[in-house]
């Protein structure tokens, strides 16, 4: 049972020891990983996934529950340590949602397949506003629906203890809830992101620079307040998107709601 | 002279070259001399890609012949070429143009590369190339869902329970280090002459092999097999 993963610091791209010498990630924790493109975010995930043992270009080592991983431990090494959901991923299999869930559940030897089907759909539908039905075809799902289903599936079926959320920007899913669900199922969650709201959702964030682990911040009270604000703006933007998409128009004669930002002044949201 | 002889097969465009480039880069950092050879049918640009690593590279094009037969008939020649290059390890990438390809040799490390996009039933359809491999690398996981990756992985493992299955991203090289470690663990050979194929190759000795071009039973001779329509439901 995984309780903790530790990354023992190695070198950055210039071979200089990285600032952070040890990073502990606990189960049920959310850690954001930020930094410009090319700063080493993917390599870090890769080191974790491959149980690096001072043998990758970064020379990092991974400890599981404070112990080094024995390279001969085939059983452990062949287990999926990391599950991943990213913006780039799509369902490609031509199958209904329910057929596929049961296929996935079977390989994990889950006994009550009917229950897991219902649970996954319920969780996925909590995450997205566009309803998903068990008979929907996977390839026909919208971006938001697909992401919601992927998160629900990773939480309930996949046995990987670490979940990497890569660049899930505001793709029509409730990200706060998604994180709650994943950690609620005992996962350690790493969010790789450029999005400030998402980065501040995490309790801690790791800053990558030139291939090395550079800084570790704990999200402070001001940042949390800011994050709440950002999420509110996102919700409003989502409402605006729905409003315009469903044929609404914006003009001066409509009542404004709050008068906070320009577009809101001209927008009347019917209740 | 002893040489690690590594056979890499897999469906077309599954990522064989992309993966092996990452693996070879890891190996080169250990100052080991690597050579690469590509067997293909009509054309390949893989030599340019391997060549960028600054390693010796050879290409064999089978042209009108079955690439698998062409491959096995040239193994000794490839071995001798690699020896001349003073290589300690040779990577032999084969085309894998038909699902019946069976390039694995008993004492050579045999790697099959297959991609997640090929569909969940592909592992069943790919024959000896996958079922007799020592290591199976699955690529393009970055394009499908976690659920599909896990189901695909299981499908592959079901077909070849003894193989070590590794997920590798051919674009970023994620996962390639494990493949490098497996390759480094494998035993070198003293000679390739006398080695045995793990599975017989697809057979074909008929009039069409000899250049016949006209359709029809009267033009057919030799090893001819007909569709059994009784079996189709
Ligand atoms: N998204 C993604 N693309 C990949 C991955 N691996 C390879 N590719 C792409 O797939 C295409 C084919 O890759 P190659 O490495 O040429 O495949 P190959 O098996 O050597 O192809 P042949 O030798 O022609 O049969 C290229 O465009 C690669 O960039 C991967 O893991 N993810
Ligand atoms: Mg190739």
Image (spheres, coloured by chain):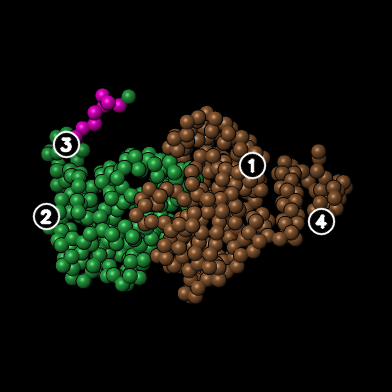
Chain colours: A brown, B green
User: Disc 2 marks which residue?
Assistant: B194
Say yes or no: labels 4 and 3 on the same chain.
Answer: no
In depth, the one of B150 and A213 nearer the eye is A213
The answer for how far apart the CA atoms under marks 3 and 2 are is 30 Å
In the image, residue B3 lies at what x, y percent?
20, 64
Say yes or no: labels 3 and 2 on the same chain.
Answer: yes
User: Disc 4 marks which residue?
Assistant: A262
For label 2, being within 8 Å of ligand 2 is answered no
In depth, the one of B14 and B179 nearer the eye is B179
Disc 3 element: loop
Q: Can residue B176 be seen in this snapshot?
A: yes
Q: Is residue B79 above or below residue A81?
A: below
Q: Residues within 10 Å of mark 2 (few under 14, many from 20)?
A: few
In depth, the one of B103 and B42 nearer the eye is B103
Chain of the residue that carries numbered disc 1 in the rendered image: A
* Quadrant in which residue B28 is drawn: bottom left
- Lateral position of residue A211 relative to residue A196, left or right: left
Tell me if label 1 and label 4 are in contact, CB under 8 Å. Answer: no
Tell me if label 4 and label 3 are in contact, CB under 8 Å. Answer: no
Q: Earlier in the sequence, mark 3 or mark 2?
A: 2
Check residue B229 for magenta coloring: yes
Q: Residue at x 75, y 56 (%)?
A: A225
The answer for how far apart the CA atoms under marks 1 and 4 are is 29 Å
Chain of the residue that carries numbered disc 2 in the rendered image: B
User: Disc 3 marks which residue?
Assistant: B224
Q: Residue at x 11, y 55 (%)?
A: B194
In the image, residue A24 lies at what x, y percent?
55, 59
Q: Earlier in the sequence, mark 1 or mark 4?
A: 1
Q: Residue at x 24, y 31 (%)?
A: B227
Q: Residues within 10 Å of mark 3 (few under 14, many from 20)?
A: few
The answer for how far apart the CA atoms under marks 4 and 3 are is 77 Å
State which region is magenta.
B225-232
């Amino acid at each position: 049972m995984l309780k903790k993963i530790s990354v023992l610091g190695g070198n950055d791209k210039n071979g200089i020891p990285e600032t952070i010498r040890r990073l502990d990630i606990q189960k049920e924790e959310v850690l954001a990983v930020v930094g410009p493109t090319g700063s080493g975010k993917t390599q870090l995930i890769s080191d974790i996934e491959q149980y690096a043992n001072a043998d990758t270009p970064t020379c990092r080592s991974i400890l599981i529950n404070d112990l080094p991983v024995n390279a001969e431990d085939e059983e452990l090494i062949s287990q999926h340590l990391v599950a991943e959901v990213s913006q780039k991923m799509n369902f490609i299999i031509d199958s209904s949602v329910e057929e596929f869930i049961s296929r996935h559940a079977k390989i994990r030897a889950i006994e009550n397949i009917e229950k897991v089907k219902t649970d996954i759909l319920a969780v996925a539908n909590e995450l997205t506003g566009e309803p998903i039905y068990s008979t929907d075809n996977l390839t026909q799902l919208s971006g938001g629906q697909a992401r919601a289903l992927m998160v629900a599936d990773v939480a309930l079926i996949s046995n990987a203890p670490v979940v990497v959320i890569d660049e899930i920007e505001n793709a029509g899913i409730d990200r706060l809830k998604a994180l709650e669900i994943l950690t609620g199922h005992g996962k350690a969650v790493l969010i790789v992101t450029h999005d400030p709201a998402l980065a501040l959702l995490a309790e801690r964030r790791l800053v990558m620079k030139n291939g090395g682990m550079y800084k570790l911040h704990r999200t402070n009270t001001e940042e949390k307040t800011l994050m709440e604000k950002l999420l509110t703006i996102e919700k409003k933007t989502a409402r605006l998107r729905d409003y315009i998409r469903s044929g609404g128009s914006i003009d001066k004669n409509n009542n404004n709601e709050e008068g906070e930002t320009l577009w809101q002044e001209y927008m009347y949201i019917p209740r | 002279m002893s040489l690690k002889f590594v056979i890499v097969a897999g469906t077309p465009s599954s990522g064989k070259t992309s993966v092996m480039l990452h693996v070879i880069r890891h190996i080169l950092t250990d100052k080991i001399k690597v050579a690469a050879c590509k067997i293909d049918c009509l054309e390949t640009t893989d030599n340019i890609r391997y060549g960028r690593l600054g390693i010796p590279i050879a290409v064999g094009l089978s042209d009108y012949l079955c690439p698998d037969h062409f491959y096995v008939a040239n193994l000794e020649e490839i071995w001798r070429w690699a020896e001349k290059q003073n290589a300690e390890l040779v990577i032999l990438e084969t085309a894998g143009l038909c699902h019946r390809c069976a390039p694995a040799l008993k004492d050579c490390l045999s790697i099959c590369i297959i991609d997640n996009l090929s569909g969940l039933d592909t592992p069943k359809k790919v024959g000896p190339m996958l079922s007799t491999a020592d290591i199976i690398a699955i690529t393009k996981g970055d394009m499908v869902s976690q659920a599909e990756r896990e189901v695909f992985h299981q499908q592959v493992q079901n077909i070849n329970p003894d193989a070590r299955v590794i997920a590798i991203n051919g674009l970023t090289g994620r996962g390639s280090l494990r493949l490098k470690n497996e390759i480094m663990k494998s035993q070198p050979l003293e000679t390739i002459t006398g080695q045995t194929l793990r599975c017989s190759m697809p057979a074909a000795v008929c009039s069409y092999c000899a250049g016949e071009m006209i359709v029809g039973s009267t033009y057919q001779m030799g090893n001819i097999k007909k569709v059994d329509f009784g079996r189709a439901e």
